[in-house]
Image: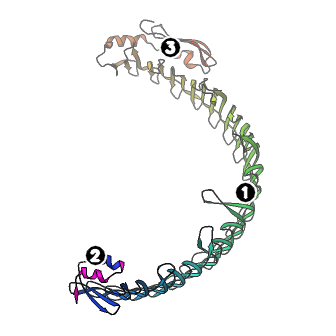
Amino acid sequence: MLFNIAAVKAVAVDVHYAKLAKKIERDTISRTNGKTTTLTIYNGEKVVEVIRLRDGKRNGIHELFNGDGSLKKQAAYKNGNLHGKTIIYNYRGQIIEEKTYKYNKARGHSLLQGKYEKYYNTRLIFSANYKDSLLHGKALEYANNNLKSIKHYKRGKLSGNAKRYNYANGLLISDENYKIIKDSISEKSVLHGKCIYYSSNGGINNIGNYKNGNKDGVWKTYYHNTPNIESEINYKDGLKYGAFTKYYSNGNIKNEGFTFEELLSNKRKKTKLDGEQKDYYENGILSKLSHYNMGVKTGIWETYYNNAKLKTIGEYSDNLLIGNSLYYGLDGDTISYVTYKLISQNNKLASVKDGTERRWKNGAKVFEQTYKDGKKHGKGISYYGNGQPSNLMNFNEGYLEGEYVDYYQDGQTKSYRVYRIDTNIRSQIKSKIIGWEYRYDKDGSLNFKNYRGKNESSLYSINFTKGKINKIQYGNGMTLNYFPEGKLMSIIINNRYSQPIFAQYFYRNGQMRIISFQNGDKGVINQIIYTSNGDLMTTTNYTNQNPDSLNPSPSTIANFGEAVGLHYIDNKFYTDTLRNGSYSLFYGSGKPMCNLQLKNELLDGEFVLFDALNGE
């Protein structure tokens, strides 16, 4: 008999299907046999659902169908509740899930009970047991028909043994044990007992025990895919605590000692060492012996070469070096020796060098420096391998002060200078070279000397080549250049802005080559160029400031050249090796060129330059 959806309402008193009847405009066939009614719902000519009711409640097998008519789901009901087996199919009619429900009167609804299986393309992928909708008992997981895991549950939580497998080759990945513990809020499952983790080839990678979710006791780690042990570490309450040993892949000990971990406020762990620690080379020889007190360096520390000979020895106190520290060579000879002391710096203790530090190479001393409270203080000397000093310096509270001398390997002086300590306007302390500095060739002949003023600027310098002067410079004011044989090559005079205002260049035979002078304040540079026999060659003038400025005529320039004669070239100012006293230089016209006074080779007093034409 055919009924429309409105007719179904009177029969389907089950709440779920009463709502369904309101939504679906489909044809329905109802068959009643005593208290049992079967509703068959169609979509066109195809059955989409079969509902069995008893006394208005679902009872018996409930079936759902796909659009092509194939079975989609079968579920057993009793008195309107799931009760019995439920099977779900894919579009090919293959079972994909099979489970059993049982009505729980106390809870007022149905719960999963007993066996549960899940399939993919007819292959079993999961098999387990449920109790009151919670996993309970053994649960098996498969992949490609191979076992993937075996786990045991109790009340929905892991309890007992749990194994995971590499489903491709069947080898174990992990073998763990769990227990259920209670806290103030609920129950939880935690690792408890022996746990083993395996490498890809089936060998053990890690093995150890858990206690109530925390690592406990000795944990062993092995090198990947090998039976060789990599480390043995003790744990307590999930943190490293106790003796540990680490190994090289060849089985020899790498390091050993005692360690512990602290749990920081941000849940991060910090590892600390305690007591005696030993490190070894791969050949088994001790490389380092150290000591800690709860993570703090303390006591004697030693390091060794891989031939077992002592390399370094020092002492720590509260992470700071104290006392003597020595460094030895492979042959046992001392390489360095230094002493440390503790002082207060910035309101905390600091380890600093104090006393004399010495270094050796191949048995010969190569360095020696005294310290005071961490600062270089007193004499410092570096040495060549032959024992000769390479340099000598002096310090005062960390700053260079006094003589600083460099030497050649044969003992000849290479350079000499003097440092003074100065404080600038920002109260910054700095070492400065002030006064005379000298440089020498290997044969002992002077090749440079320079005098620096208070601000370290050069006031006077003189360069030598093979004992002969090649350049003299008075600050930025005057420069004299000489030919190798000692004859004057040029005179250059600058204004206070270091700009050349007058210059003369000479040939080797003493004849004038070029006269260059500046025309007043217009920035015009005039040049007179002569041949080597003294004949006028040409005159030029130019300016970079104003190309249209009025320049002196060639005849005026030539007259200027005639006024500048050559007789003064033999003036003792140019020929004296050590200049001292008053000097006057003259133009060829007899007019004064400049007056200057020197004291111990340095300008002392006025320096006056006169105009060659008007004498001003």
10 Å crowding of disc 1: few (<14), some (14-19), many (20+): some
Q: What color scheme is it?
A: rainbow
Question: Residue 436: x, y in percent?
Answer: 64, 26
Which picture quadrant has residue 601? top right
Q: Which residue is mark 1?
A: 329
Report whether residue 37 is seen.
Answer: yes
State the CA–CA distance, disc 1 to disc 3.
Answer: 67 Å
Q: Which residue is mark 3?
A: 568
* Viewer-proximal residue among 490 and 347: 347
Residue for point 71% across, 39% down? 375
Q: Which residue is mark 2?
A: 22
Whichever of callouts 3 and 2 sits on the residue coming sooner in the sequence is 2
| 1 and 2 marks in contact (CB < 8 Å) | no
Question: Residue 276: x, y in percent?
Answer: 76, 62
Residue 78 lies in the magenta-colored region: no
Q: Name the amino acid, label 2.
A: Lys
Q: Nearer the viewer, mark 3 or mark 2?
A: 2
- In this rendering, is residue 163 above or below 549? below
Residue for point 40% across, 16% down? 518
Q: Name the amino acid, label 1.
A: Gly
